[in-house]
Structure formats: structure tokens, C-alpha cells
Amino acid sequence: MRSKSSSDNSNATVTRSGSRRLATRRDSRPRLSRRAKLGRTTLGTIAAAFLLLLASTPLFAQIGRQGPMNGGIMSPPVNQRPPGLQFVGIDQHLNAEVPGDLQFIDESGRAVKFADYFDHGRPVILDLGYYQCPMLCSELLQGLVGSMKVLTFNLGQDYDVVTVSFDPRETTAMAAEKKRDMMKRYGRANTDQGWHFLTGKADQIEALTKAVGYQFQFDPKTEQYAHAAAIVMLTPDRHISGYFYGVEFAPKDLRLGLVQASENRIGNLGDQVLLYCYHYDPRIGKYGAVISNILKLAGLVTMLILGTFMFIMFRADRRRDRIAPVAHGELGRVR
């Protein structure tokens, strides 16, 4: 009786063990199927989102092209300007070459030519004003210094600044005093050779302002000049790259302007990406976003992410396929 009972118990144990192994094999297969279904569902969702992004690109590009960009300062036609300001403004001469043989006197009293500041192959920021200006010129210089301090580019190493007085009555002493003030505000050591303050004769001043399209007007009643507030970006070969209006300049615009004017001699890969997504708009004197290019770049990044994800998923599927036969073989040996 005991042997029969033991035999029955042994058979029951084997049956339960076999049932467990069979249940384990049956349960393992649906789990692999659910993972595969989850992977296919995830890939399908991402692919659908990517197709939706591509389909919406033309729509966003059209939205980005609708209407002019807002902001900025533009000079109205001469016949629409108020009395006393008929000859004040800026006529943009983009890509025009500025004469290099114009003669001036720098802050140390040395005779120089305008071309002397382009021998180092660096972009140049040209600032036109006058040193005894009671308000606008000083505010512009302070705004320019504030933006320059934010830049990682170093004055005199990556770019130069040339400030020219369009008042022929001003002296070298005035230029030197203005330079001391601005260099103190800038505050970086060994940069004083990168900013130059010039004075000159009326005919040389007129030739320079005419070349860049800068118009100003003298008011004999107040003995002051009416003029626009702007800086001009020049390439290393003295061509006009852009105009930036106002008395404050966004560091981003100033940096991109210098990179573009330098013909990519300064800057990094990030600046190149920004220049692809932002283009200079001469109507407002700023860099504006190009929606179509941003969407193209976003589509490229999405494709890279999707491709990487699919590669990882396929590798995981192949790894599971290699592991599954081994697991089945081990179960067979156990049985």
C-alpha cells in the first residue's frame, strides 16, 4: 500500500512539474509577442508623427513668409521727412566697397588711412557720430559696449571697431577722451588697439558717409547735428555686410553679424547652425528666423532620432531571436 501511494505521489509530482514547464513555455511565447506588438505600435506612432511633421512643413513655411517682419527702424523717403530732417537717414549700400584711401587722424594724432584697419583680415564695426553729441551718440556707444562685453569675441583679436566723427571741427583731444571712456567701460585688458577714434577733414568725412549711405544734417540754431543711430558691419575687404539700427544691439545679432562679416573666419559650428536658421533682414537691421529652414533642420533631427530608435529596436529583436532557441533547448533538456 505504501509503495503504491509513493508511486502515485511521484507520478503526481512529475505531472505537476511537467505542467509547470509546459505553462512556462506557453507563457513565454505570448510575452515575446506582446513586446513585438509594443515595438511595432511605438514605431508606427513615431512614423505617423514624422509623416505629419513633413506634411505640415509647407504650411508652416507659408505662414513664416506671410507679411513683413515687425520692429526695427527704417528711413522714410526724403520728401516725407519732417522739416529739419530732410537729409537725415540711412540709404543702405549692401555689398558696396568703402574706399580705403580716405585719410583721417587717430586719437594719438597719427595720420592714418581707412584701409589701415583692414590689414589684419578681421571684420570691422563702423560707428559714425560726433564726440560732443549731448545724448544719442553716447547712448549708442554705451549700448555697443554693453553688447560687446557679452560676446566671447575679443576686441582687437577677433574684430575691430572704428568710430569716426563726422564733425570736422572736432579735435584729436576729444577723440582721445572718448576712447578712454569707452575702453574703461569695456574693461578687457590689452584691447585698446582694437578700437580706433578718428577725426578728419570735411571732404574725407563726406566721402566715407556717402559710401555707406549715412546722412546727417547740421542745425545752426542749436549748433548740433541731426543724424540716425546705427552701426555698419564691414567685411575684411571693406565691403558693407549689414546695418544695425538703434542705440542697443542684441548680442545675438551682433555676434551673427560679425561671424557673417568675417566670412566664417571667426565663430564655431553653433554659429553656422544659427546662420542657417536666422538670416539678416535689411528692412529691420536684425536677424530673423527662417521658418522653412528651421523646419528642415527639425525634420533632419527627427529622422536621425527615428533612425537611431529603429536601429536599437531591430538589434533588440535580433538578440531576442538568438536567445529564444537557446531557452527552448534548455527546456527540452530539462524535460
Image: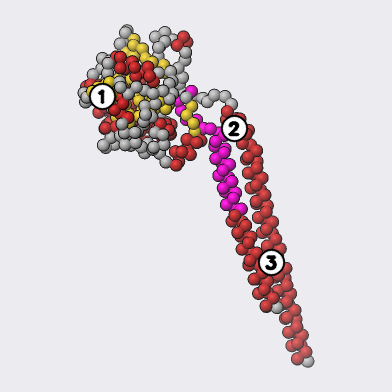
Magenta region, residue range: 283-310
Q: Residue at x 55, y 33 (%)?
A: 291
Task: Give the secondary structure at mark 3.
Answer: helix
**Three-letter code, disc 2:** Ala
Residue 144 position in % (x across, y down): 36, 28
Is 269 in the magenta? no
Q: Badges 1 and 3: C-beta atoms under 8 Å apart?
A: no
**Three-letter code, disc 1:** Val
Compared to residue 85, the image places residue 13 above or below, namely below
In this rendering, the label closer to the viewer, 1 or 3: 1
**Three-letter code, disc 3:** Ser
Nearer to me, 196 or 136: 196
Task: Give the secondary structure at mark 1.
Answer: strand
According to the picture, the residue beneath numbered tag 3 turns out to be: 28
Counting residues from the start of the chain, the first of labels 1 and 2 encountered is: 2
Give the spatial CA distance, label 1 vs label 2. 49 Å
